[in-house]
Amino acid sequence: MGKDPAQGLQPPDNPTYARVGPLAWTLGVCMIVIGVVTSVLMFRDFQSDSYLYLAFYSIPANTAITMFPHEPVLIYFGKVGELLPTAAWATVGTFVAGVMDHKVFVPVLNLQSIQSYKERPFYRKAIGYFRRWPFATLLVAGFTPIPFFPFKFLCFSVGYPMWKYVTALLVARFPRYYLYALLGATFPIPNWILIASVGVIFGLYAIKGVPMAVAKLKSRKRARQTAGTYESDA
């Protein structure tokens, strides 16, 4: 029988929270507002020198849960701007996103009421491997096309130090952003393709997310109705 990779790797000071504080809720709302406002501004005034737009857009585009793709936007700025400023400004936004992510999702994933997920075999095996090479794992996942969210989830679930997480994020993301900008500068990708790719991604999220949201609202409504029935019977 193989040894459980998680055995002996659970720290005694792994954080737990009784509730999500106001700071986490506030930052979560800010992520959404920044994404919506910046997207509107970029589509209304999309100019080659609007690096500030890129920095703000990179905040929601690099949060743990996002529907804003960063790749088409970086390719566009590579076409109309300079490579180093494009990568640098996107990295600034990513730094802000990393700090906000850590402040929001470490409390959320370590709520005392949901800790049972950490006892599941798949999580225990995954977190065991992650703890062996956390920084290197974040570097590889942050630079390559590997989906990054699962590794963020593991990172936040154990309260990995924010400065180490943000450092890995910046070291991995800057060269990735540079390469996307270089792609835009090298190949004449039409703007309509970039815009269409953003629309397709939004559409896929909507197709998947809207039914889930509606089902969750209906479930909550039924739960409230059931609770009301019990109270009236009492």
Image: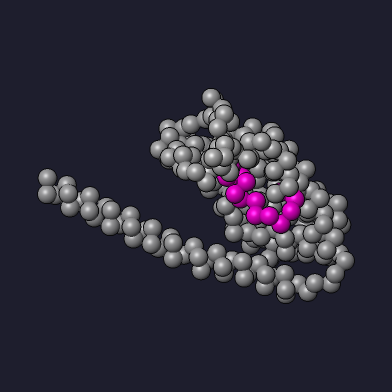
User: From the viewer's perspective, is residue 19 above or below residue 201?
Assistant: above
Q: Position of residue 232 (x, y in %)?
A: 14, 49
Q: Quadrant of the N terminus?
A: top right
Relative vertical location of residue 71 with respect to residue 118 in this rendering, above or below:
below
Q: Position of residue 201 (x, y in %)?
A: 61, 66
Q: Is residue 2 above or below residue 88?
A: above
Q: Main secondary structure of the magenta part?
A: helix
Q: Report the colour scheme.
A: one colour
Residue 35 in view of the camera: yes
154 lies left or right of 230:
right
Indicate the position of residue 183 as horizontal and vertical percent values. Answer: 83, 63
Give the residue displayed 65% in from the left and 51% down from the top: 148
Question: Is residue 194 placed above or below 23 in the rendered structure?
Answer: below
Question: In which quadrant of the rendered image does the C terminus lie?
Answer: top left
Q: Which residues are magenta?
A: 142-155
User: Left or right: where does residue 8 sit relative to residue 113?
Assistant: right
